[in-house]
Image: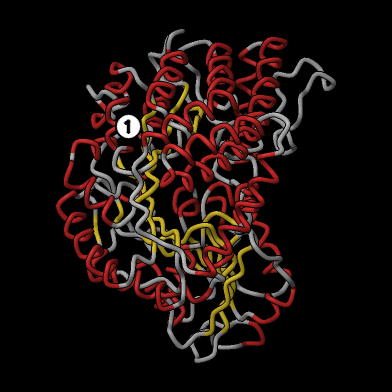
Amino acid sequence: MTMGKGGKNLLERGTRCLFIRSKFDTFSFWNYFDACKILGAKFPTAPLGLMTAAALLPRHWEFRLVDENVEPLLDQHFEWADMVCTGGMAPQRHGIISIIEKAHQMGRPVVVGGRDPTAQPHWYKSADYLVTGEGEVTIPMFIQGLEKGDRGGEYHSPEKADMGQAVVPRYDLIGLKNYMQIGVQYSRGCPYNCEFCDFIEINGRKPRTKNPGQVIKELQFLYDLGYRGYVDFVDDNFIGNKENVKETLLAVKDWYEANNNPFYFSTETSIDLAEDAELLQLMKDVDFRYIFIGIETTEDRIIKSIQKKQNMNKDIVSAVKRIQSHGMTILGSFIIGFDGETAQTAGNIVQCIRDSGLCMVMLWRLNAAPHTQLARRLQREGRLLEAAVCGSNYKTEEDSPDSPDSPGFFDEYRGCTGGLNFITARPRLDILNDYIHVLENIYNPVHYYRRLTRTCLDLKPANKYKPGPSGNLKLLKSFFRVCRKLGFNKTSGWLFWKMFFKVLFKNPPAIEMAVSLSVMCFHLYHQSKLIIAATSQEIQYIEKYGEESYRNLVRCAHNCLE
């Protein structure tokens, strides 16, 4: 049998399993810490992957879950544990590796799994047990390994899990009030074939869904734990199987109304949601409020080249307005750096955002993620910037910029200040300048509040979820924090109050959404300033040393951070 601390048999009753969620990198649009503080939470999202993994392990074990994003990780946690489990995504990589090192210092075996270890397992070789692929398939393989006496090993399978047999995550292991939203997963996979997407490489192109009873069971568990409020369906594409999702939404509606509308929802879908009136109404009936949609670009010839056929020949502005007419606000994703872009691309993106009234926008630089069709194509074309020896193209030691493992150009390699890890079709300087142009425009507070006001005046929210007395008190406290932070802001305070009273008097049902979107403006504006500053550094470097030298810097970052 495999032994833990003090020679303990890890399979016996009473084994203590410590789950640790490592910190996320902070330099990202996604990590809206300031918004969390204003709204009375500690972190945006709960650790759904770790809670699901806990539900797949032996029921007679004891579990604790520590989220470093909401509480400190202490030596006492390791001392309590017989085994440590961790894992996650690329922005957590450094934290995961440090957890492995700390656990080994404390003499505890470590199990690692999740999205990034599955995509790039070579970075996690120091873990005792590497469990990759879908946990429903590979965690049983890990348990069998323990039964055989394995003291380490890798457990992987390309097999996809049957979502109809999925377990209910251990939501009871976390402090629900620490998070802005709690995640529920309904499906995995997306039927589309976007060239740059790694979701379809990991989860497949055949959507696999839970049945309505499973979804209701998870919602009931959250309800029984006393949770009320924001629930996010964390799917690759919530509407990937429209027939199944409609059946599920009908069942959720019955449960929802019978339980006095305890939640409101968000999710990620494709733009073709706008074409299905029945689906839009079903989502409105259960109070979906936020929808993430990958728009990426407005130009059909680029859309065709990146194989995003669901966006082909679409009037994006009309589609956005049709969805928002059902009370759902869209978070739109755009990407800069595709082959085929021209000097007009940035202006087209800005125009689309302005005309559609999109408020929350994520603007990324194209990244050729490992194992994607894009990465494979660029490698065939000799354009992928793979690892090289750091510093080989610097003229002198004094000329060398910040090293890639220190604060500087590549704090978030895959995110807003990373990407473009390939030889671009257009001059890199043109792309970086366009990137700055779009950011400066869309997050200028005057432009943002103008879009916000127009959108909220037209919005017809369902507002089915009504907070109870404690929820209303929390909202009131959050509103006072918003007023203090935004209402007296030298840059945008007058814009906030102008918007607030206009929406309050002309469309009061939308005032809660208007305040929430104002908080996101505060976050996005400050993040954009940081990203613009970092991007300007890159531009200065290229202007001084040339693009070839800069490409080597990208290779260095790939080597050091990837």
Q: Judge by depth and name the residue closer to the eye, 217 or 509.
A: 509
Q: How far from the left and from the top, in percent, is residue 556?
A: 64, 31
In the image, residue 31 sits, relative to residue 1, either above or below, namely above
Q: In this view, does 408 lie to the left or right of 516?
A: right
Badge 1 is on which residue? 320
Q: How crowded is mark 1: few (under 14 residues within 10 Å), some or many (20 or more)?
A: many
Instruction: Look at 21% across and 61% down and name the residue there.
Output: 248
Q: How far from the left and from the top, in percent, is residue 94?
A: 64, 51
Q: Is residue 440 visible?
A: yes
Instruction: Look at 61% across and 36% down and name the residue there.
Output: 559
Instruction: Look at 61% across and 39% down and name the residue there.
Output: 523
Q: In this view, does 217 lie to the left or right of 499?
A: left
Q: Can residue 558 be seen in this view?
A: no
Q: Name the element at disc 1.
A: helix
Q: Judge by depth and name the residue closer to the eye, 503 or 470.
A: 503
Q: Residue furthest right?
A: 398
Instruction: Look at 53% across and 63% down and name the residue there.
Output: 472
